[in-house]
């Protein structure tokens, strides 16, 4: 964030300043929503934590609204109204943000959909941009191919593993621990909500 603020202060053109402010806004939305997914997942007593798919929908829709203020059209579609694991929601939202970060300079449209195939959650993004977000695809373990209309079709498949409960390590949250009312780290049995 500090890098964006420095660039904003050094920028002399109004259009350039607006783009930088837009990126700051998108990062703020992402941070708020990403942390919300983490907190909701950590509040769950069962493992793995399952959240209403609406929580992920709220994240994606708010980010798409932010993109819309920057002139990027976007849409989200999901037929499922059920639940999604906290891990899957976090991974999918992180994938979305990684892609947006990489193509933010030239993206004109983003369409995203979720569907379930057996025990897999499949996130598909159609991104209209000059270049494929190769680095985001690599980092997130997704697939990328050019669609018939010249846009990029990205696909991330998340396999639900019901027996796995190593939530904090899976999403690299080792530094985030619930804090009890006395300020020390606590077990799930003595947290105050």
Image: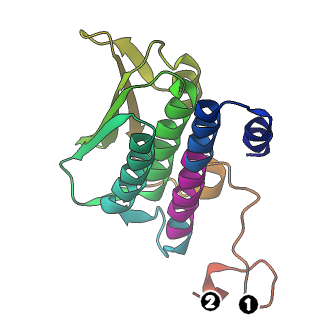
Q: Which of 125 and 67 is in front in this view?
A: 67
Magenta range is 26-40
How far from the left and from the top, in percent, is residue 80? 21, 52
Residue indicated by mark 2? 192
- Whether residue 166 is visible, yes or no, is no
Q: Magenta span has 28?
A: yes
Give me the disc on residue 169.
none
Residue 43's place in the image compared with 38, above or below, is below
Query: What is the chief secondary structure element of the magenta stretch?
Result: helix
Circles 2 and 1 in contact, beta carbons < 8 Å: yes
Q: Please say whether residue 51 is visible from this viewpoint.
A: yes
Q: In which quarter of the image is residue 127?
A: top left
Q: In which quarter of the image is the C terminus?
A: bottom right
| Residue placed most toward the observer, 37 or 2 | 2
Left or right: residue 6 compared with residue 35: right
Label 2 crowd (10 A; few <14 / some 14-19 / many >=20):
few
Mark sitting earlier along the chain (2/1): 1
**Other residues around mark 1 within 10 Å, as few (<14) / some (14–19) / many (≥20):** few
């Amino acid at each position: 964030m500090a890098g964006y603020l420095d660039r904003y202060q050094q920028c002399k053109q109004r259009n350039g300043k607006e783009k930088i402010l837009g990126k700051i806004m998108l990062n703020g939305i992402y941070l708020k929503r990403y942390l919300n997914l983490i907190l909701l997942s950590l509040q769950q007593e069962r493992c793995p934590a399952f959240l209403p798919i609406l929580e992920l929908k709220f994240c994606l829709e708010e980010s798409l609204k932010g993109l819309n203020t920057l002139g990027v059209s976007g849409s989200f579609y999901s037929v499922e109204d059920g639940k999604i694991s906290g891990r899957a929601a976090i991974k999918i939202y992180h994938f979305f943000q990684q892609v947006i970060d990489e193509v933010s300079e030239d993206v004109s449209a983003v369409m995203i959909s979720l569907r379930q195939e057996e025990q897999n959650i499949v996130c598909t993004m159609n991104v209209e941009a000059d270049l494929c977000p190769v680095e985001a695809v690599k980092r997130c373990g997704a697939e990328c191919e050019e669609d018939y209309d010249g846009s990029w079709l990205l696909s991330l498949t998340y396999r639900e593993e019901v027996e796995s409960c190593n939530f904090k390590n899976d999403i690299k949250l080792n530094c985030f621990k619930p804090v009890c009312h006395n300020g020390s780290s606590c077990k799930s049995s003595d947290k105050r909500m």
